[in-house]
């Protein structure tokens, strides 16, 4: 890879998360200096504690921004605006934001970022394939029964390895300033089809059951999932998952010059690690 001559010193927020740790690993693999900003490990960073922001930014020239819990959450726009302004004030010129497809709130956060005057790149990602192996859907997969309020509307699940590859390119190479990349897989499938693909790859029987949204929310509450997380998931399943994002995007090809990874390939690779084995 022809790394940009500036050899950025990069702050990776959410550095232990699905995308952040992969971005950090790629930067480290290029012998580029990386600082992890997390609530546990690395340099302390907490979106709810602004006192942690400036120490994390000290000496940095670029940043990968992953907002927790989601850009659709209340207060996200204000936080992104304040952080990006502080970053520019402290000499950080390149900002790469992990955003979401089809979310008005996320687009407001994108505007707040670009208004900072930094060299920005926006990564609008679809649903993560890795949510089935590293996120909140892993336990249902292992239990053999996945209950979700998602029916026949398809989603072009994106492999987070692709997100990390695009982020690395945007952070280290010229030509990506001002770009908005729609990051998806090459085809859209339903949640039921995704679970079926995983069952085949894992060699197991895994049932998918569509449930009413109200029952889904009640089930989460009964499992003591925090109310704000329940509200966010309900928003994503009942509002964002309405077909607006069913068409695959071309961001991976535009940024990397190759096709995105397919969900079946993700499922095969994940199954080979044994993550979905039981017993």
Image (cartoon, rainbow, N blue to C red):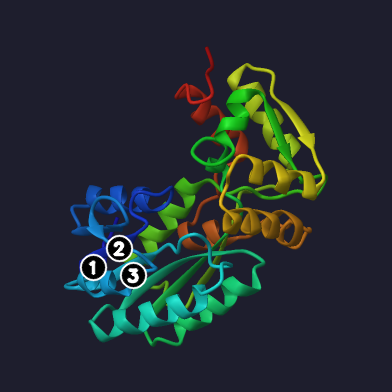
Tell me the quarter of the image containing the N terminus. Answer: bottom left
- 2 or 1: tag closer to the N-terminus: 2
Q: Going by the image, does 7 lie left or right of 277?
A: left
Q: Under tag 3, what secondary structure? A: loop
Q: Where is residue 46 in the image (x, y as percent from the top left)?
A: 34, 64
Q: Under tag 2, what secondary structure? A: loop
Q: Position of residue 61 (x, y in %)?
A: 24, 73
Q: Position of residue 53 (x, y in %)?
A: 28, 72
Do callouts 3 and 1 mark residues in contact (Cβ within 8 Å)? no
Q: Label 1 crowding class (10 Å Cα cut-off): few <14, some 14-19, many 20+?
A: many
Residue matched to label 2:
45
56 vs 40, nearest the viewer: 40
Q: Label 3 crowding class (10 Å Cα cut-off): few <14, some 14-19, many 20+?
A: few
Q: Which residue is drawn at 81% across and 44% down?
A: 151
Asked if 2 appears above or below 51 in the picture, the reply is: above
Total label count? 3
Closer to the eye: label 3 or 1: 3
Q: Residue at x 36, y 64 (%)?
A: 64
Q: Which mark is residue 56?
A: 1
172 vs 39, nearest the viewer: 39
- 3 or 1: tag closer to the N-terminus: 3
Residue matched to label 3:
49
Q: Where is residue 157 in the image (x, y as percent from the top left)?
A: 62, 47
Q: Going by the image, does 28 lie left or right of 250?
A: left
Do callouts 2 and 1 mark residues in contact (Cβ within 8 Å)? yes
Task: State the separation of the CA atoms marked 2 and 3.
Answer: 8 Å
Q: Residue furthest top?
A: 279
Task: State the separation of the CA atoms marked 3 and 1.
Answer: 12 Å
Q: Which residue is drawn at 55% across and 28% down?
A: 268
In terms of image quadrants, where is residue 102? bottom right
């Amino acid at each position: 890879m022809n790394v940009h001559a500036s050899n950025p010193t990069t702050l990776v927020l959410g550095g232990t998360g699905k995308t952040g740790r992969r971005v950090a690993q790629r930067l480290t693999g290029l012998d580029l200096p990386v600082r992890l900003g997390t609530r546990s490990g690395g340099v302390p960073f907490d979106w709810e504690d602004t006192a942690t922001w400036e120490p994390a930014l000290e000496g940095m020239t670029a940043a990968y921004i992953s907002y927790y819990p989601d850009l659709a959450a209340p207060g996200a726009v204000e936080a992104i605006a304040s952080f990006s302004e502080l970053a520019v004030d402290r000499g950080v010129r390149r900002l790469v934001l992990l955003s979401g497809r089809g979310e008005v709130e996320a687009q407001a956060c994108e505007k707040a970022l670009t208004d900072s005057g930094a060299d920005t790149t926006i990564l609008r990602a679809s649903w993560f394939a890795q949510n089935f192996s590293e996120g909140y859907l892993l336990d249902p997969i292992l239990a053999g029964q996945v209950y979700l309020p998602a029916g026949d509307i398809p989603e072009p699940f994106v492999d987070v390895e692709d997100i990390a590859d695009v982020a690395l390119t945007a952070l280290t190479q010229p030509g990506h300033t001002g770009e908005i990349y729609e990051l998806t897989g090459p085809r859209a499938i339903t949640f039921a089809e995704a679970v079926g693909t995983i069952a085949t790859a894992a060699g197991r029987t895994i049932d998918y059951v569509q449930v009413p949204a109200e029952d889904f929310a009640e089930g989460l509450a009964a499992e003591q999932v925090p109310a704000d997380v329940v509200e966010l998931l309900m928003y994503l399943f009942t509002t964002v998952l309405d077909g607006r994002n069913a068409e695959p995007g071309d961001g991976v090809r535009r940024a990397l010059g190759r096709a995105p990874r397919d969900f079946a390939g993700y499922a095969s690779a994940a199954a080979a690690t044994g993550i979905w084995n039981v017993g």
